[in-house]
Amino acid sequence: HDVDPNRIFLMGYSAGGDGVYQLAPRMADRFAAAAMMAGHPNETSPLGLRNIGFTIHMGDNDSLYNRNKVAADWKKKLKILRENDLNGYSHFVKIHKNKGHWMEGLDTSAVSWISNFSRNPYPEKIIWKQDDVTHKRFYWLKVINPLLNALIIAKIEDQIITIEKSTIPNMIIMLNDDLVDMNKKIIVKYLDKEIFKGIVQRNITTISNSINEYGDYKSIYYGELSISLNIE
């Protein structure tokens, strides 16, 4: 339908806000930014939001289910994440004074804020935190057997891929020429040890599968590398 996959946004109010809290971190690779209004996150974590914009709008008096207190807590969490990772976690949290569950339209300012963002489908760093609903792919990482609450932190610098942390032993690294020069050798490191060095070949199967998985013509990979980690 001629939609730009890098300009897709997620918004929700009340129970819809619950959904944004849930879906934005676990499906961040689909969105440019997300806006949560008057919802509750339940058990979800903000870790997966590193590479998208995320805004929260909440009434100061919206006390049912402690929605207002939880929003204030997420403001602190996002602030800490941003301070520790200045290239990630773009966010804006607004607690509207003297407003309850209905913010009288003040939350509509979220539209202009999220509109400033475009998705980066191939970020250099990924923080993938699984929830109680798991996924098999997140940006350029893939797992065959996802685990509840698993965490992978990985980054690409030049031709070096570093797995900084993982609670799951087996994963697939998906590559294209936006991420690395696939004509040259790449190195994969884990716990400061080199676990792979070589060229990852482009192949039609990976290209076809990555298109069919998402139907996203701006998120296509040319080759993949399966790795196994010795998780202590």
Image (cartoon, rainbow, N blue to C red):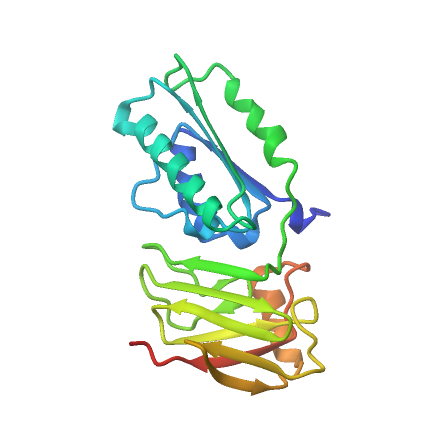
Point out residue 216 in the picture as x, y percentages from the top left corner: 63, 58
Q: Is residue 134 above or below residue 141?
A: above
Count of all numbered marks drawn on residues in the image: 0
Q: Residue at x 55, y 51 (%)?
A: 51
Q: Residue at x 66, y 81 (%)?
A: 203
Q: Would residue 222 be found to the left or right of residue 55 on screen?
A: right
Q: Is residue 185 above or below residue 101?
A: below
Point out residue 204 in the picture as x, y percentages from the top left corner: 67, 79
Instruction: Tell me where residue 220 sits by quadrant.
Output: bottom right
Front-lying residue, 95 or 157: 157
Q: Residue at x 53, y 66 (%)?
A: 155
**Residue farthest toward the top in the current orientation of the protein:** 98
Q: Residue at x 54, y 61 (%)?
A: 125
**Residue farthest toward the left in the current orientation of the protein:** 65
Point out residue 113 in the picture as x, y percentages from the top left corner: 60, 32
Image quarter hosting the C terminus: bottom left
Q: Is residue 190 above or below residue 214?
A: below
Q: Would residue 206 be found to the left or right of residue 93 on screen?
A: right
Point out residue 37 in the picture as x, y percentages from the top left corner: 45, 29
**Residue farthest toward the bottom in the current orientation of the protein:** 198
Q: Is residue 126 above or below residue 103?
A: below
